[in-house]
Image: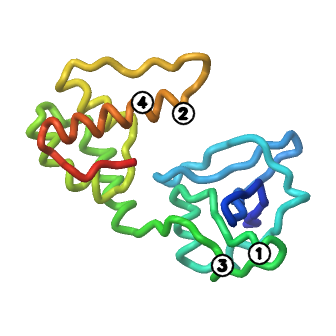
């Protein structure tokens, strides 16, 4: 499989690379979500990308990409000649993916705040907070979902994460919150 590394910008001494597979003629490409599902996104310009066969990628980079890493950084001095060692990204561990699978399976069976507290170490180990997890915690406090205004899903998600983190602290579940 061909993997595309496209420079999409930079700042603060870094260049940003978008990593994707299967670009289409209409400007779309695909990356993988944290649970390994292929997700379509826009916009790509594969003519600007450096292309590798997936077998050429270091194993931990390929695993991380297949589990949600699709933005990578490198020092701006390496714009044209970066190597695998120059790339900075969140390295996804197998234990995180295993924990995420457990959370996805068990979150629907959580009925009480105590059940949530029991599952929370696995949630934290997964390093992913999904809408299902946040909604479950919100339900114990009768907090409605955060509405999206003017299509600003990122702002709504940030607000939801802030509420989620506050509830973790308020309920005594955690003091080290995500963000």
Closer to the N terminus: mark 4 or mark 1?
A: 1
Residue identifier under label 2: 154
The residue shown at (29%, 59%) is 125
Closer to the N terminus: mark 4 or mark 3?
A: 3
Q: Do the residues labelled 1 and 3 touch (CB within 8 Å)?
A: no
Distance in Å between CA atoms under marks 2 and 1: 31 Å
Category of crowding for the residue at label 4, using alpha-carbon neighbours closer than 10 angstroms: few (below 14), some (14–19), many (at least 20)? some
On screen, 54 above or below 120?
Answer: below
Q: Do the residues labelled 2 and 4 touch (CB within 8 Å)?
A: no
Residue identifier under label 1: 77
Closer to the N terminus: mark 2 or mark 1?
A: 1
Residue identifier under label 4: 159
> Could you say where residue 7 lies in the image, as x and y percent from the top left?
78, 60
Closer to the N terminus: mark 1 or mark 3?
A: 1
Mark linked to residue 65? none
Element type at marker 1?
Answer: helix
Element type at marker 2?
Answer: helix
Residue identifier under label 3: 86
Closer to the N terminus: mark 2 or mark 4?
A: 2
In the foreground, 34 or 148: 148
Element type at marker 3?
Answer: helix
Mark closer to the observer (1, 3):
1
The residue shown at (30%, 35%) is 164
Q: Are marks 2 and 1 in contact (CB under 8 Å)?
A: no
In the foreground, 116 or 55: 116
């Amino acid at each position: 499989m061909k993997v595309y590394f496209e420079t999409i910008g930079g700042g603060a001494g870094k260049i940003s690379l978008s990593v994707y597979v299967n670009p289409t003629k209409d400007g779309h490409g695909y990356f993988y979500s944290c649970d390994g599902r292929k997700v379509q996104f826009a916009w790509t310009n594969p003519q600007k990308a450096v292309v590798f066969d997936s077998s050429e990628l270091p194993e931990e980079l390929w695993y991380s990409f297949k589990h949600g890493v699709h933005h990578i950084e490198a020092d701006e001095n390496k714009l044209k000649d970066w190597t695998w060692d120059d790339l900075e990204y969140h390295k996804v561990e197998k234990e995180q993916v295993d924990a995420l699978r457990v959370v996805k399976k068990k979150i629907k069976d959580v009925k009480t705040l105590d059940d949530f507290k029991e599952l929370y170490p696995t949630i934290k180990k997964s390093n992913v907070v999904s809408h299902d997890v946040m909604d479950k915690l919100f339900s114990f406090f009768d907090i409605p979902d955060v509405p999206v205004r003017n299509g600003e899903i990122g702002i709504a998600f940030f607000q939801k994460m802030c509420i989620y983190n506050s509830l973790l602290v308020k309920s005594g579940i955690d003091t080290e919150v995500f963000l």
